[in-house]
Image: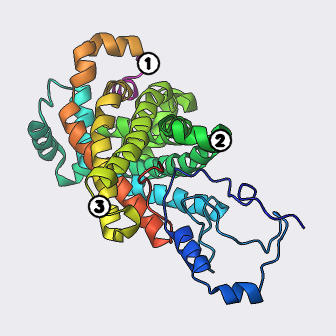
């Protein structure tokens, strides 16, 4: 029977995406066996498709095989990433509802809401403390749906595009793979988010329109029809796709640089708390760039969802180019930076909880 080649026993997972010490320990165990044992119990040469062939692959992460552990890139893996995305996006967006409320009103009515401080003061005076969380239900449900698609499909498309490129090209063009995977995932995620976002903005910026999703959704549909729920989809893509491309690609690169130049020991030797700290820091840095890149489209989404029958051209004309890029930007940088850092922290914390590695790391040379 022909001996097994190294190439045929390799997993088809891309080498650069994760790092772990699982195979190193397996290799160490294999070379530590006494030579007598090898002489007495020679290994049989098995076909490459044999279920008994369990030799470690040469890739930098070994999928857990212990009972109860989640196999990398299995349906359970993608389900875990999807649920982690629900937690990371739904909870964090709901928590910053007061900031989002002030930001939306500053974009829609800058003459009244002139600054962050005055915006909070006006809302407190007119609506009381409860007014700060107006629209929290469509926020929670909408961004939970978006997070499920964003993180779940990102992991799927990242592997899919890596497999299409091949191992060498996947390593060489890994940033392009991060960008393509995140853009593909966000395209789907925004279709799930858009109806909730439309109702949320109308509830938050039209006093007296509705108290929340339960009464706001039927009023919105009665006014503009079901098609009106997707009136802001194209601007939403314009806001969220560049945001998410920056969020994932910048995060992956930032985490790689932090492990290379800031953290004094390799990732696989770091404690879980240190790894999660790196995830939060990388997420916060990525979030600052996300806010800047996606802010003009965010202004358009707020304007279109607030004004019945408005067009993109009318929004740009009324706000002006400078206002389009700067109105509400400082608050959004603070909000998105904190939001993105918390999202990556929660997402990777959940992955660690279910036995998966944190996202990102030092690329293989």
Residue that badge 1 annotates? 309
**Is residue 292 or residue 128 the one in the foreground?**
292
Residue that badge 3 annotates? 277
Q: Quadrant of residue 271?
A: bottom left
Q: Is residue 305 magenta?
A: yes
- Rounded to the nearest angstrom, the CA distance separating label 1 from label 2 is 48 Å
State which region is magenta: 302-310
**Is residue 362 or residue 140 the one in the foreground?**
362
On the rendered structure, is 346 left or right of 155?
A: left
Residue at horizontal 46%, vertical 42%?
A: 196
Secondary structure beneath dot 1 equals loop
Secondary structure beneath dot 3 equals helix
Residue 202 locus on image (x, y percent): 37, 35
Secondary structure beneath dot 2 equals loop
Give the vertical position of 316 relative to 118 (above or below).
above
**Is residue 178 or residue 216 the one in the foreground?**
178
């Amino acid at each position: 029977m022909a001996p097994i080649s190294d190439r045929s026993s390799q997993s088809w997972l891309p080498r650069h995406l994760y790092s772990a010490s699982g195979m190193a320990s397996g290799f160490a165990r294999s070379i530590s066996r006494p030579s007598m044992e090898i002489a007495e119990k020679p290994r049989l040469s098995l076909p490459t498709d044999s279920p008994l062939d369990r030799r470690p692959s040469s890739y930098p992460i070994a999928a857990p095989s212990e009972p109860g552990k989640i196999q990398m890139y299995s349906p359970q893996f993608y389900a875990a990433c999807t649920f982690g995305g629900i937690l990371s996006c739904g909870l964090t967006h709901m928590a910053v509802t007061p900031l989002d409320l002030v930001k939306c009103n500053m974009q829609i009515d800058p003459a009244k809401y002139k600054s962050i401080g005055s915006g909070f003061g006006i809302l407190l005076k007119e609506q009381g403390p409860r007014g700060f969380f107006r629209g929290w239900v469509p926020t929670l449900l909408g961004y939970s749906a978006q997070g499920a698609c964003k993180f779940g499909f990102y992991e799927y498309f990242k592997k899919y595009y890596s497999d299409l490129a091949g191992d060498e090209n996947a390593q060489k063009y890994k940033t392009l793979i991060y960008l393509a995977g995140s853009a593909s995932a966000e395209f789907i995620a925004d279709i799930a988010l858009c109806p909730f976002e439309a109702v949320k903005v109308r509830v938050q910026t039209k006093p007296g329109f509705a108290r929340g999703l339960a009464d706001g959704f039927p009023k919105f549909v009665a006014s503009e029809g079901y098609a009106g729920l997707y009136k802001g989809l194209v601007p939403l893509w314009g806001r969220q796709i560049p945001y998410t491309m920056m969020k994932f690609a910048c995060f992956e690169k930032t985490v790689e640089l932090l492990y290379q130049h800031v953290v004094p020991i390799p990732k696989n030797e770091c404690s879980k708390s240190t790894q999660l700290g790196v995830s939060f820091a990388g997420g916060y840095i990525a979030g600052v760039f996300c806010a800047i890149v996606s802010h003009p489209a965010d202004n358009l989404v707020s304007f279109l969802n607030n004004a019945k029958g408005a067009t993109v051209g009318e929004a740009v004309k009324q706000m002006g180019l400078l206002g389009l890029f700067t109105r509400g930007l400082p608050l959004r940088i603070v909000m998105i930076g904190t939001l993105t850092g918390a999202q990556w922290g929660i997402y990777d914390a959940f992955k660690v909880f279910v036995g998966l590695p944190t996202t990102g790391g030092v690329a293989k040379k």
